[in-house]
Amino acid sequence: MYAGEHCAGTELMIGPLFVAAGVGAFDLIVGLLFGNALAVLSWMFLTAPIGTRLRLTLYFQLEKICGRNLVTLYNLANGVMFCFLAGAMITVSATALGVWFDFKMPGLNDIFPNSIGWVIAVIVVGAVISVVAAYGYKTVARIANIAAPWMVLVFLAFGLIGLKQFIDADGNQIQNAGDLWTLARTQIWKGGDPLPGQVKFTFWHVIFFSWFCNMAMHIGMSDLSVFRYAKRSWYAIASAAGMYVGHFMAWISASILYAYQLHLNPADTDVLPGPLAFRAAGYVGLLCVIIAGWTTANPTIYRAGLAFQAIRPRSSLFKITLITGGIATFAGLFPAIAMKLLDFVALYGMLLMPMGAVIFVDYWLMKKVNLYPFFAEKSRINFNWAAGLTWFLTLATCLLLVKFAGIQIFFVSLPGWFVAAVLYVILSWAYQKRKAYLMG
């Protein structure tokens, strides 16, 4: 599932956006090596140990900690963000149909759909993805298991073909690793100024982005719902299949394709996975884009369906997931989400990160400081104000750092996690003591 989910259609968006952000070769390669290692370690030492010990979904565990009403608010926010993320993946798959059926597609800075063909393609792709997701975890995992090995090979082919195109374009002679590195830093990832409307990426941007692009899943604890199926916590090492195949090899391959597009025509700045893949691998590339978007959107819509079902537990997960897929499909109509994917995933991680800190502290620290874990369940309250205030105040702190301290959104979540952990301990101490006093 990790290989299928993270070696996916969105990699054909994120890779090119690195080039658009003016990243240098050393910054990209070394930054991805370190950042993805930190992501794997986050799954292994933060998420999986709790998931395999308690074997609860994220939403049920939060309900025990935070109370029904606060979790309803959290689930709403979580589900909506999952829908937007899945919408970006549907957008990616639709760009492949754009090449196949030759309709007008959106550009790098477009916000709204710009052709009827685009609207029809997004609706068709979204409908198929939603039906598969609605059939549940086993169907989602089966689709990923079938598609992942083939997609990995196609993404590898993208990178190799892109390099060959660069070599052939100017008659470059690649005799050794030094020649290849020279090509990489002078023609592919050249550094310099970003394209208009993009943020300049440095070594630290690459590390923090690759670490935190899945922050909602590991540090934010959303993958508790997945790891409740794992036999041992060390099985989280499987996330490396997603990180180093998807968020290393696939990002690099996709960025090579986009760099070659700019090499051919510097004015052609559109980031469209379909045309990029078609130029490299023909119709096999288009099929890969469609299936890659599919295998990523499937588990994302499944997670969103779980979030919305937690709001209405008696509702059918099948029906809720279909409705969720409809929301994701509507979001996919708007290309701005996919074109600003770097900023969106940073915002998404920041939004859910405080509750991940709450879960971590509640499981590992509360008893050690003589406080009750699962306080909402024990005290039968519907809104744990300690957890709620931790969430709101942490987000406010992060937004203030972005707004007034000039810290970019890619960097605020790390200090934000420690702010949330400290706040939850302090606020829980005050809140639990007050509740004990009122209850006599």
Image (cartoon, rainbow, N blue to C red):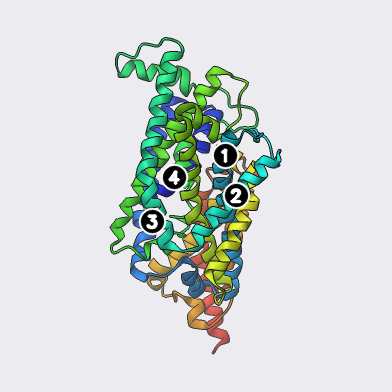
**Front residue (pair 146, 406):** 146
Cα separation between marks 1 and 4? 32 Å
Q: x and y percent of residue 130 in the render? A: 54, 57
Specify which label sits upstream in the sequence, 3 or 4.
3
Residue assigned mark 4? 211
Q: Few, some or many C-alpha atoms within 10 Å of disc 3 (few <14, some 14-19, many ≥20)?
A: few
**Front residue (pair 416, 49):** 49
Cα separation between marks 2 and 1? 10 Å
Quarter of the rendering containing residue 320: bottom right
- Taking the spot 49% from the left edge, 54% from the top edge, the residue there is 298
Quarter of the rendering containing residue 105: top right
SS type, badge 1: helix
* Residues at discs 3 and 2 in contact (Cβ within 8 Å): no
Tell me: residue 385, above or below residue 206.
below
At label 1, the amino acid type is Leu
Give the number of the mark in front: 3 or 2: 2
SS type, badge 3: helix
Residue assigned mark 3? 142
Specify which label sits upstream in the sequence, 1 or 4.
1
At label 3, the amino acid type is Arg
Cα separation between marks 3 and 4? 27 Å
At label 4, the amino acid type is Trp
Residue assigned mark 1? 97
- Taking the spot 33% from the left edge, 69% from the top edge, the residue there is 53
